Image (tube, rainbow, N blue to C red):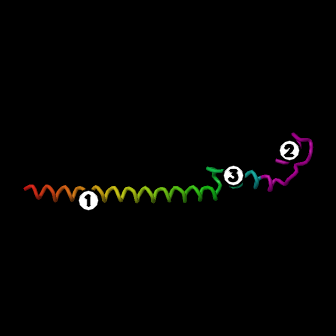
Amino acid sequence: MRIVYRQAAKSEAPMSEEHFRRVMSPEEFVRGCRGIGGPQPDEMCRQLASHRQRLAELEAWLAARHNAIRMAAENLERKFAKLQ
C-alpha cells in the first residue's frame, strides 16, 4: 500500500498500513455508515425492535380474528342445533 501511494502521490502515506487496513475493513465500513436503514449495529437493533413490535401487533390482531371466527362458528352451530 505504501509503495503504491508513494508512486501515485509522490509522497509518503499519511498513515500506517495497519491503520489503513483497519479503517478500510468491511467491519469499519459498516460501523461508519450512518442513517436510517443503514447496516450499522445500532440501526439494525432499532429496525429489529421495530419489526418485532409490529409482528407482535399483527399476531395479536390475528389471534383476535381467529377467536372471533371461532365464536361466530360456535354461535352458528348453537343456532343451527335449535332449528332441528
- The spot of residue 40 in percent (x, y) is 65, 55
Image quarter hosting the C terminus: bottom left
Instruction: Please tell me whether mark 2 sits on a helix, a strand or a loop.
Output: helix
Type of amino acid under label 3: Arg
* Residue highlighted by disc 2: 5
In 3D space, how far apart are the residues under numbered discs 3 and 1 (Cα atoms)?
Answer: 49 Å
The picture places residue 77, in percent across and down from the top left corner, at 17, 57
Q: Tell me if residue 7 comes above or below residue 52 in the rendering.
A: above
Q: Which of marks 3 and 2 is in front?
A: 3
Instruction: Inspect the image, locate mark 1, and give the three-letter code of the amino acid beneath it.
Output: Met
Which mark is nearer the camera, 2 or 1?
1
* Secondary-structure class at tag 1: helix
Q: How far apart are marks 3 and 2 (CA)?
A: 28 Å
| Residue bearing the label numbered 3 | 34
Mark earlier in primary sequence (2, 1): 2
Residue at x-position 35% and y-position 59%: 64
Furthest-right residue in this view: 11
